[in-house]
Image: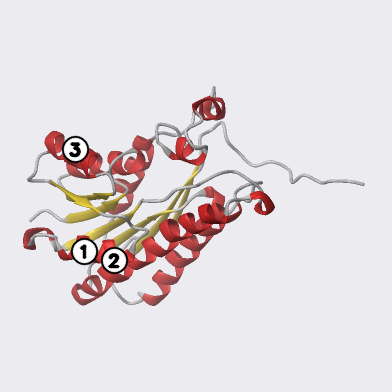
Amino acid sequence: MAKIALVTGASAGFGKAIVEQLIADGIKVIGAARRFEKLKALEVTLGSEYFYPLQMDVSDTKAIDLALAGLPSQWQDISILVNNAGLALGLDKAHEADFTNWMTMINTNVVGLIYLTRQLLPTMVLKDEGIIINLGSTAGTIPYPGANIYGATKAFVKQFSLNLRADLAGSHIRVSNIEPGLCEGTEFSSVRFNGDEDRVKALYQGAHAIQPKDIANTVTWVIHQPPHVNINRIEIMPVSQSYGSQPVSRD
């Protein structure tokens, strides 16, 4: 029987590309997202045999419970979890930021990810089988102005992933954290900049940023490693992006 994966944030961007690649690899996928109409459109394209659309708002723990409880029996044996759903809101410095945006990022990037993981993990432990892939960010390692809470949530994802590995020592469950740098072809920056497409265009102009397909390929590469191999963490950037000197302000 084909394995079953649950991918959050499946309606667009990384999530959609990951869903398409997993299905191409013969894995059945539950695609979870808030925008059910986009998931239903994916179902038409991908077919109901290999794709199941699941309306889920990961920032709402009760919504997660309802979504999981409503899964048909033939879709309940989930052995792969891809925690892809996440967002950044704004690029304001901490003293100017909207606290509501902070809480939305925390509830989505942290609370939703850990709650869904906690709901699926006991069954994986019971079966002694499973793969959890979390989507982090280079922002979880490299600070930059305006990344305050977003970067902190992704640092949490990195450490949570490593601590899961520690908790699961001796089991056959694998945990990975994929940390993309500058990416285009998603809604990420449009959401971050509240629909300011000129600002989005300027960010990616001439940057040759990585694409959703690149992340989908990475996810499937992680999944298809031999069972004795765990990829702890992957940091991915476009060639155009790199590290620089730390700025020094002088009086």
Query: Residue 192: x, y in percent?
Result: 50, 41
At label 1, the amino acid type is Leu
In the rendered view, does 17 fall on the left or right side of 191?
Answer: left
In the rendered view, does 247 fall on the left or right side of 64?
Answer: right
The circle on residue 206 is none
Q: Nearer the viewer, mark 3 or mark 1?
A: 1
**Residue 230 visible to the viewer:** no
The circle on residue 66 is 1
Q: Report the residue at 73% width, 43% height from top.
A: 245
Q: Residues within 10 Å of mark 1 (few under 14, many from 20)?
A: few
The circle on residue 42 is 3
Disc 1, disc 2: CB below 8 Å? yes
Mark 3–mark 2 Cα distance, whole angstroms, equals: 25 Å
Q: Nearer the viewer, mark 3 or mark 2?
A: 2
Q: Along the line of sight, which residue is nearer the eye, 213 or 12?
A: 12
The image quarter containing residue 112 is: bottom left
Query: Residue 157: x, y in percent?
Result: 46, 60
Query: Residue 49: x, y in percent?
Result: 7, 45
Q: Which residue is mark 2?
A: 62
